[in-house]
Image (cartoon, coloured by chain):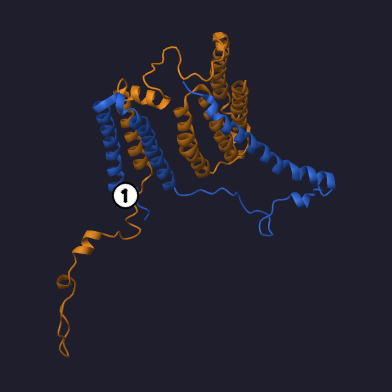
Chain colours: A blue, B orange
Amino acid sequence: MIDLGQYLPILLFLGVALAISCVFVFLPMGVSRLTGTHNPTAEKLSEYECGFPAFEEPRSQFDVRFYLVAILFIIFDLEAAFLFPWAVSLDFTGWSGWTTMMIFIGELAIGLIYAWKVGALEWE
Amino acid sequence: MIQAIAFYLFATMVIASGVLTIMSRNPVHSVLWLILAFFNAAGLMVLLGAEFIAMLLVVVYVGAVAVLFLFVVMMLDVDMAELRAGFIKNFPLGIAIALVLLAELVLGIGALGAGPLELGTASGANAPNLANSNIENIGALLYSKYIFVFEAAGLILLVAMIGAIVLTHRDLKTTRGHQNITKQVRRNPKEATQMKQPTVGEGVEL
């Protein structure tokens, strides 16, 4: 059973954060409209980059090796996530649970050794 | 009372950000809305009492999967005009998928009469209550009853890792020489240098 009352401060924190961010976004907009400084023209709204119109899309292709690093991160992130319930439940699972996790870590260690040997972790 | 308000807040936010994920024109904005949907789904999980799942949603989905999605969006360099050009060509396929999703929606709405909303209880009817917290329960089941499923998950992760390496890794040894540390350390002065006494008028034999 979980006492959700423990989460009330977090909920209050979220509410305060939401209120403050709304103030920061909407207050300047409202003030500028009320004081009459809100006066957009085509020149003001055009995109602008160091005195020139933007030359190209801001997105550009980059090396696929970043993707490989991200995938490896996901896998070891999941491994760490599996470690938490294992660590607190050893009273219930005992030696079989411990061995299970060691085999699991061994499986991923094979992958790590492979990545290391192939050179996937190297950056030129 | 507060729980019900929080539930409807999170549920509305999940649905709204899900809609914005598929409606927004910029794919990067789509990913950001998806992250908001993940956060609110985590809030829903907390309300259900599944605290560990909630933390996993934040750590794994927001921390890793969403970053991966951003990478994919950036790497693909999506041209939206080009994507829209294929609209007519893929129209029948899109309609077929939409029908399948509509059937799922109808089934889901049909589950509306299943019962009232139960919030703040850690257990469903069949959930075993071995320990006094959510994460201990998960561990006690996952590493005893579901050992083989867990090990299979490990094998799948291994396959995913090796597959990703095979697909994306390129051997870069041709571009620049690689440092062989063992070879460098094993060098000694006797092999590396030679003393020569060259005489005048003759060459040096190396």
Towards the viewer: B58 or B169: B58
Image location of residue A89, percent across then percent down: 34, 27
Q: Amino acid at mark 1?
A: Gly
Image location of residue B155, percent across then percent down: 30, 31
Residue B186 falls in image quadrant: bottom left
Question: Relative to A63, is B140 above or below?
Answer: above
Image location of residue B90, percent across then percent down: 56, 27
Residue B125 falls in image quadrant: top left
Residue at 51% from the left image edge and 22% from the top image edge: B48
Q: Count how many numbered circles sit on residues in the image.
A: 1
| Left/right of residue B122 with respect to residue B166 in the rendered view | right
Q: Is residue B44 visible?
A: no
Residue A81 falls in image quadrant: top left
Q: Report the quarter where the N terminus of chain B lies.
A: top right
Label 1 marks which chain's residue?
A
Neighbourhood count class around disc 1 (C-alpha, 10 Å): few under 14, some 14–19, many 20 upward: some
Task: For mark 1, give the secondary structure.
Answer: loop
Residue at 36% from the left image edge and 19% from the top image edge: B130
Residue at 44% from the left image edge and 47% from the top image edge: A66
Question: Relative to A103, is B115 above or below?
Answer: above
| Left/right of residue B75 with respect to residue A81 in the rendered view | right
Question: Relative to B104, is A13 above or below?
Answer: below
| Left/right of residue A86 with respect to residue A59 in the rendered view | left
Which residue is disc 1 drawn over?
A119
